Image (cartoon, grey):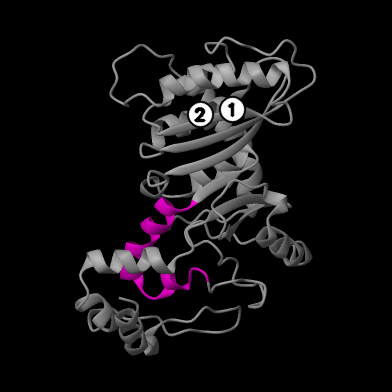
Amino acid sequence: MTMCFRRCWAKRSSSIPTATTAGSTAKPATMDAESQSEFLTILPIETRLQIYRHVLPLGTVHFLSEKDYMFYVLCGDRAAHTTHACHAVRRALSPLRYWGMALDNISEFGWGNPYLPPEVVSRGEVSLLRVCRQVHGEALPVLYEGVTFQVDELETWLRFSSGVLGERLSLVRALRIKFSMQRGAPGLVYDAFWAVVATRMPHLSDLEAEVQIDHGVSPLPSDSDCEWYRPLREVRGLRNFSLKAVGRNDTEDGRTIRVVSSELKRTMCSPRDESCPIPTFPRSEIDLGLRKWSSGWRSGYRTDKR
């Protein structure tokens, strides 16, 4: 398969469009060139999908925010690890802070603002998506389905979900999140995040959540129907779910979280078509919360949907 891919790729290379920077031009691939590609005309779609899975680095996509921009770093490590301990993230942060910009293309991880110098933007890992529209359309779902998305702030995922096409968001299979539990009610952003997970991510199967418990939260809620856990019970159809307390696994809070996690897992991993009464989200309040924070970042964030 690899040799066949290389042979077809070599004949295709002359019509591959190259990435550009400001002031330069590139000749886009034409529909005629696509129709003559042996990779697309000879290999069946099943074989092409296998090639995409072999070529694309299906690891972890880290979502970060820097100076009102949001950007993404794709690393090859699929196992759970902290964002700031990731070598790929550390390598990306320095030039991004220097240029004061971010890789903000929400469809093609790793390519961003064309005004960034070429050496700052890494294109090699996902350059397959740049070949032509057909390859992009076939391979991008493989990337969305194969990687684990990791966010340290719920607002970041709301930004992503409002800027990406709905069919792309529905392809996400694995999500790893962190959030803070503070004194009082959770807030609009918290409810809006879980509403997105419950209503716009029907194929999500693996969800890992870490909660940072504020010192003012005492005692920790142990009822899975309390206002902090109630939005999670709206989610259905998961294969795996875990909820952990950051730095408190051996404390009473950690034991409470494990009990709550077990109760939530039974609900969240039940079939999506299960007919049982569950709380509904206040749609008007969620929309209000989305409007409040969205106006602040859209001025510096490109929202063209791909």
Q: Which residue matches tag 2?
A: 194
Q: Which residue matches tag 1?
A: 190
Image quadrant for the C terminus?
bottom left
- Residue 230, how many percent across, how many down? 52, 16
- The segment highlighted magenta reads 125-147
* Direction from residue 269 to residue 273 in the image, left or right: left
To which quarter of the image does residue 183 belong?
top right
Secondary structure of the residue carrying tag 2 is helix
Secondary structure of the residue carrying tag 1 is helix
- Tell me if residue 139 is in the magenta stretch: yes
Asked if labels 2 and 1 touch by Cβ distance under 8 angstroms, the answer is yes
- Up/down of 260 relative to 122, above or below: above
Name the amino acid, label 1: Tyr
Nearest the eye: 122 or 101 = 122
- Up/down of 138 relative to 30, above or below: above
- Tell me if residue 137 is in the magenta stretch: yes
Q: Residue at x 42, y 58 (%)?
A: 143
Q: Residue at x 40, y 14 (%)?
A: 278
Q: Residue at x 79, y 17 (%)?
A: 216
